Amino acid sequence: MRAAVLHTPGRPPSYGERPAPSASPGSTLVRVTAAPVVPLDLLCASGTSYFGVPATPYVPGGQAVGVVEASETHPVGTRVWLFTPAGMRPGDGSMAERCSVPDGDVVPLESDVPDELAAALGLSGVAAWMALSWRGALQPGERVLVLGGGGAVGQAGIGAARVLGASSVVAVARMPSVERAHAAGADSVVPLGHGLDALTAALRELGPFDVVLDPVWGIAATAASRVLADGGRLINLGGGSGDEATLSSAVIRSRSASVVGYTNNSLTPEQRRDAVTAVFEHAASGRIRVAYDVCPLAQVEDAWRRQESGAAARCVLVPG
C-alpha cells in the first residue's frame, strides 16, 4: 500500500510503499479517508520526546477517520475515528491507505461531521473538551480565557467553552493566527507579542477569568495566572511557548486559585469515546470549528514541513 514512511528521526516522512496491515483477532482494519498531521506526530518522530527514539521505519500518525474493512467488533462499512500510539510504541500509524488498530481504539461516527473536519479536530478537540469540562469543571455563566487561541486546541476550546455555557470567551493568539481565533467564535482576541506587562494589562481589562485553557505555558500562562478570578482554574495541557512560567504564590493563594495539569493519555477509552462523540456532534452543527487545509497523502513531506512552521492551519492528509 502507499503510505508516509519515516526512515530517520528528526526528518519528514516520505511517500512510498509499505506492507499493508491485515485483519487479526481483537483489531479493526480501517481504510483511511483523512489523517491529520499534528504536533504530537512531529514530536514523537523527532526522537526527542519522553517516549524515546521510535523504531524506524514506521508509518506516523496517531489518529484518523476512515471506513471499517474488517472487524469482529465493528460492522464493515462503519465510518469511524481511530487512535494509534504510532511513535510512542512500535508499530505503524494512520498516514497510510489502511491502518489496523485495537477494537477499543475505534469510535463509530454517529454524526454527519465531514471526514476532514473530524480528522482536523480529533484529539485536539478531545483535549479542549475534557480540559474544560472535566479538569476545569467549567460552569454555565463563567468567563473563559483561551491561550493559543489560533491553534487547533485553542480553536476547539473556544467553541467548547461556548457549548458548555461560558458567558464570555477571550483568546490570546499570535499575530498570524488572530483571525482563526476570531473565526472560532472568541468575543475578543488579544495579540501575543507586546511583553508580559502589556499582555497582563490587556487581559486585566477583559477579566477576571474563572477558567483558563492553556496549551502554551510560558509568558501567556504567567499573564493569565495574574488575572484569575477567585476560585479560578488554570488548566495546562501543553508547553508550546516553553516549559517554564512564573507564578505568584501570593496571587494563587489570595484567590484560592488552582493550577491543574491535563493530558489525553490519562483518559480511559470510554472517556475518549464520549468526548469524541460530543465534539463531533457539536462540530457537525457548526458550534465547534477549526481551520484546516486538505493535502494529498503524496504531499506528506510538504504538509509535515508546514506543520513544523507553526504558522499554517492544520494539514489533513487524504488519499491521493
Image (tube, rainbow, N blue to C red):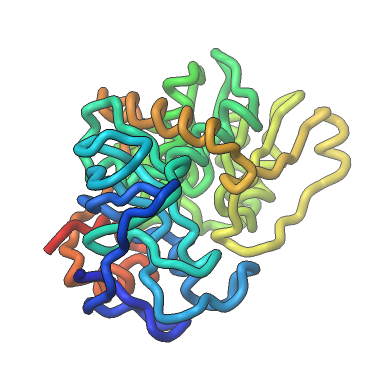
Residue 214 in view: yes
Percent across and percent down for residue 86 are 46, 63
In percent of the image, x 57 and y 45: which residue is there?
264
Q: Nearer the viewer, residue 11 or 254?
A: 11
Q: Residue 183, relative to residue 198: is it above or below?
A: above
Figure disc tally? 0
Q: Nearer the viewer, residue 251 or 63?
A: 63
Percent across and percent down for residue 202 are 56, 41
Percent across and percent down for residue 187 are 41, 29
Q: Residue 66, relative to residue 52: is it above or below?
A: above
Q: Please identify the quarter of the rendering in which residue 297 is found.
A: bottom left
Outermost residue toward the bottom? 8
In percent of the image, x 39 and y 84: which residue is there?
7
Judged left or right of residue 208, residue 94 is left
Outermost residue toward the front? 25
Question: Can you say which quadrant of the picture contains the C terminus?
Answer: bottom left
In percent of the image, x 61 and y 36: which residue is there?
212
Residue 43 in view: no
Judged left or right of residue 243, residue 272 is left
Q: Nearer the viewer, residue 2 or 232?
A: 2
Question: Can you say which quadrant of the picture contains the N terminus?
Answer: bottom left
Percent across and percent down for residue 25 are 41, 49
Q: Nearer the viewer, residue 292 or 224?
A: 292
Outermost residue toward the left? 320
Q: Residue 179, relative to residue 109: is it above or below?
A: below
Q: Residue 197, relative to residue 278: is it above or below?
A: below
In percent of the image, x 61 and y 74: which residue is there?
52
Judged left or right of residue 88, residue 82 is left
